[in-house]
Structures are given as C-alpha cells and as structure tokens.
C-alpha cells in the first residue's frame, strides 16, 4: 500500500481526536451530573431526548 | 462511549445516545474495513485516495456544524431562546474540531499528492483556515465569562459576523489565487470508483451520527452547567446543607 | 440620525485630538513597523518594493486594532456608554459616528504611511487616484468591522488579546483586496487594481450595515 504512513497519520489523528473528545465529553458529563440533583437532569426521567 | 449502568444515572447519556454511540463504533469499523481493504486504489492518487474517507466527511460536517451555529445565533438574538444558544455553542465547539481535522488531514494528504503540506493557491484550504481562526475566536469570546445573556449575545454576533463574512473571504481568496489546485469536487466529477464513493458517503453518515451524539452530550453538559449556576439550585443546596452541615456548596 | 452620528464622530475626534494619542503614539508606531519590516527584509530594495503594498496594509491592520481599542475605551471608562444610551441617541447613529471617527484616524495614519513607503521603500506611485480610492473604501470597511467587534469585546476580560483574534480574520478580504489594488497602483504587479475596489466596497457596505443593525443589542446588553 502506497502512502501508508500518511494514511495512518491522517486516520490516526482523526479517530484519536474524535475519540478523545468523546471521552472528555463523557467524563465532563459525569462530573457535572453528579453535582446536580437527579430530578433536574430531565433527560434521565423522560424516555426521549430534549 | 458506552455507559455502565448505575442505579442513578449520573452522566449525560441516555438510551438514544448509547444507540448512536454504538452506531458510530460500528460505522468506524466498517469504514476502516471498506476504506483500507475493499475500496480500490486510485489511478492517479494511488492509495492516498483513502484519506478522503476521513477528510471529506470532516469538511462537510464542519460546514454543517457552523451553519447550525449561525442559525442558533440568529435564533438567540431573535427569540432569546436559551435552547438555541446552547445549540450554537455546542455546535461551534464540535465544528472547530472537525474544522481542525479537515485542515490536518487535507495537509497530510496534500504532501504526497501536491507535494506540499500547504498550498496558498487553493481557495478552500485558505478559506477553511480563516474560518477555523474565526471560530476559535468565537469560542474565546464564549470562554471569557461574564453575564450569561451578554456572553450569548456577543457570541451570537460573532457567529453571524463569521457566517456573513465567509462568502466574502471565499470570493476574495478565489480572485486572489486565480488558479486552484483543489479537486474541484471529488463527488460529482464521476472519477471515483463505486466502493470509494460508497465508503465516503458512509463516512459522511457516520460523522453525522457522531456529530449528533456529541451535540446531545455537549448540550446536556451546557445544560448542567446552567443548572449549577442558576439561582434555583441554591434551594437544593440549602436543603442539603440543612441535612448535613458537613457537605459544602456545589459551586 | 446622521446628525447624531456626526456629533458622536466629532466627540470622539475631539477627544483624540485633545489627548494627541493618535499623533504622539499611533503614528510613530506605524512608522516604526515600517522600519522594522525594513530590518526584517534586510533593507533589500527589490524585495521591499515587491512587498510594499502587503506591508503597508499589514501595518494598517495593526494600527486598526489600536485605534479600535482606543475608540472602545472612550465608551467603557466612566460608564460613558450608559450616558450615550440615556441621551437618546440611536445605537446605529453611535455606530456610524464611531466608525467615522476611527476611519478618519486611520486615514490620517495612512497618509503618513504612504509618505513612509515612498521615502523609506522607494515606492513609486503610478496611480494616485487608485491609491486614494483604495484607502477610502478599504478604511471604511476596516473601521466598520473594527467598531462592531470593538463594542463586542468591550465587556470581555482580556479584550486586548481577543480583539485581534476576532478582527484580523474578518479583515482578510480587505488585506487581500487592498494589497492587490496597491500592487497595481505602485506598478509592482500587473493586475487590474480597480476591479478589487468592488470587493472592498462590498465588504465595507456589508460590515457597516451589519454593525448598524447589531450595535444596539451589544450596547444595551453588554
């Protein structure tokens, strides 16, 4: 396969960045959710999303 | 992206987001499979064509995300809708990531194809960079803090300024660099093989689902932040303080 | 409304005139930037000549951030914004007035800069009309976008650093268009400079209208 280094770099950076961002969103969500009373996290009670 | 079940779900996930999350994971796996093993190499670009499977979806979602930000900005100024303000903010943040990835993957792809990381003569490249800087400025205005509605208004005006000026910038760069290197449009010129096209469209769909997943989570994070700041949370804190004097304030 | 705009512009210009900041600090700064570019390019005449139009407009961009910051700080200190609002002047008029004041200051700096590039870089102006028209049209756009963004960052922490991040990318078309027009006027590159004025004018009109429309929201809320 030609250009394998370039391809791995491009795909790696892309998937890595999106993965890290998704992970950070999760972590941040958990940290914040823990500090807000359950009845105010309204999507937890409703089946659907806001 | 999976969320272990807790008795009281203290996270920003829900059934919908879990579904979307799994769809993204499956989609990425399919993209890798199709992109690296099924899609044939290009006559001209050889295997470097496989970069477009991540590059083109990132570029498209960049413009989707910033369009949503522009709409959200207008809706905030028009209706004073907090919902739209949070949507604008969330979309801008995700859009900046997509935009950065578009630039990085484009650059990496340009090196073997155009023999340069950066081509000044290319309109889309230069416009995208300016858009990137503008949206970083948008996030900077957002992060500076201050009165909530003032921040929203400022950010909304920045969003609208960016949206209105982008066509002018595009036009000016186009005239400035009378030649353009960019693939005029990889999608419509019919030079791509079937599997290549299919994988690229799959990529756009998967990126779109990822965008949706991130938007929902990011929206809820912003929502929680507001809840924490809002005054009516004070009651809850006061109530908890009354129960146990040792537990401190939430902020 | 135009009368109010004129009043605001005169007020700002009078404040600038009395404080002499534009003349005692901004103009020397602009000249200094020209000299520094000379050092950076090793006082290489051919290179300097080729880069003159670009360097000229880059300098104007730098100066514009200073001018906008000055113009904004006039209103933020001592709650002058509130007073302006209470005086019943339309926000659009305030915007137009402040834009005009910034534009006048920038034009003054540009006059000095033109003299600077002629003397220091040996630039040979072939088309004075084009130089004049470019300066006028481009400056209106710069002042309009600058005044709008200046009001926007007025209440922000660290506004000195946020303003350039927001303003300079927006001004990219002006830099491109005005530089090309100057290339023609100075005869360094064979392009049709007049054709770029349309772009500059479009930029100016759009950003001035945008500013006039959104200035009120920013003035009241931030």
Image (tube, rainbow, N blue to C red):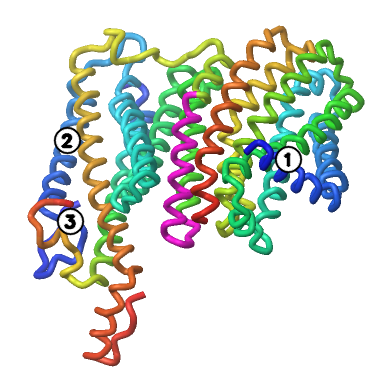
Q: Is residue B94 visible?
A: no
- Whether labels 3 and 2 belong to a single chain: the reply is yes
Number of the label disc, if any, that sits on residue B27 = 2
Measure the alpha-carbon separation of dots 1 and 2: 56 Å
Q: Is residue B146 magenta?
A: yes
The majority secondary structure of the magenta stretch comes to helix
Position of the N terminus of chain A, as image quadrant, is top left
Report the residue at 23% width, 49% height from top.
Answer: B216
The chain to which mark 3 is attached is B
Q: Are marks 1 and 2 in contact (CB under 8 Å)?
A: no
Horizontally, residue C35 falls left or right of residue B71, namely right
Report the residue at 28% width, 51% height from top.
Answer: B83
- On the image, the x and y values in percent for residue B192 come to 26, 12
Which residue is the site of mark 3?
A: B13
Instruction: Report the magenta residues as a range.
Output: B143-167
Horizontally, residue B110 falls left or right of residue C209, namely left
């Amino acid at each position: 396969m030609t250009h394998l280094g370039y391809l791995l770099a491009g795909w790696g950076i892309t998937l890595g960045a999106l993965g890290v961002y998704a992970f950070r969103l999760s972590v941040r969500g958990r940290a914040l959710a823990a500090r807000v009373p359950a009845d105010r996290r309204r999507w937890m009670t409703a089946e659907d999303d806001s | 992206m999976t969320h272990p079940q807790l008795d009281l779900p203290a996270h920003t996930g829900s059934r919908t987001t879990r579904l979307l999350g799994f769809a993204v994971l499956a989609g990425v796996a399919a993209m890798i499979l199709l992109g690296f093993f099924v899609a044939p190499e290009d006559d001209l670009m050889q295997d470097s064509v496989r970069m477009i499977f991540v590059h083109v979806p990132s570029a498209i979602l960049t413009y989707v995300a910033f369009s949503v930000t522009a709409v959200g900005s207008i809706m905030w100024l028009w209706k004073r809708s907090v919902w739209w303000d949070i949507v604008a903010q969330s979309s801008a943040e995700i859009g900046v990531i997509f935009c950065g990835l578009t630039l990085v993957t484009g650059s990496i792809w340009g090196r073997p194809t155009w023999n340069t990381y950066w081509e000044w003569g290319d309109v889309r490249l230069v416009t995208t960079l300016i858009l990137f800087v503008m949206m970083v400025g948008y996030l900077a205005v957002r992060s500076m803090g201050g009165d909530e509605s003032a921040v929203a208004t400022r950010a909304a005006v920045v969003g609208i300024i960016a949206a209105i000026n982008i066509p002018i910038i595009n036009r000016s760069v186009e005239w400035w660099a009378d030649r353009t290197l960019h693939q005029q449009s990889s999608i419509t010129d019919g030079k791509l093989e079937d599997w290549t096209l299919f994988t690229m469209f799959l990529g756009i769909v998967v990126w779109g689902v990822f965008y949706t997943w991130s938007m929902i989570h990011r929206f809820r994070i912003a929502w929680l932040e507001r809840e924490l700041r809002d005054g009516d949370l004070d009651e809850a804190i006061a109530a908890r303080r009354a129960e146990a004097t040792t537990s401190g304030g939430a902020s | 409304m135009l009368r109010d705009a004129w009043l605001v512009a005169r007020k700002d210009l009078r404040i600038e005139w009395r404080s002499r900041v534009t003349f005692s600090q901004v103009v020397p700064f602009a000249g200094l930037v020209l000299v520094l570019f000379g050092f950076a390019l090793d006082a290489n005449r051919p290179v300097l000549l080729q880069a003159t139009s670009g360097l000229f407009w880059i300098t104007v961009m730098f100066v514009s951030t200073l001018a906008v910051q000055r113009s904004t700080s006039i209103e933020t200190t001592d709650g002058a914004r509130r007073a302006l609002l209470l005086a019943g002047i339309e926000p659009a008029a305030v915007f137009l007035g402040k834009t005009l004041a910034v534009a006048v200051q920038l034009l003054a700096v540009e006059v000095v800069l033109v003299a600077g590039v002629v003397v220091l870089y040996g630039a040979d102006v072939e088309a004075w009309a084009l130089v004049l028209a470019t300066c006028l049209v481009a400056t209106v756009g710069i002042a309009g976008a600058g005044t709008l963004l200046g009001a926007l960052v007025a209440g922000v922490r660290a506004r000195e650093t946020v303003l350039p991040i927001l303003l300079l990318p927006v001004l990219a078309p002006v830099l491109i268009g005005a530089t090309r027009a100057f290339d023609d006027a100075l005869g360094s590159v064979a392009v049709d400079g007049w054709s770029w004025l349309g772009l500059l004018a479009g930029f100016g009109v759009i950003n001035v209208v945008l500013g006039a429309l959104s200035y009120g929201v920013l003035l009241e809320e931030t």
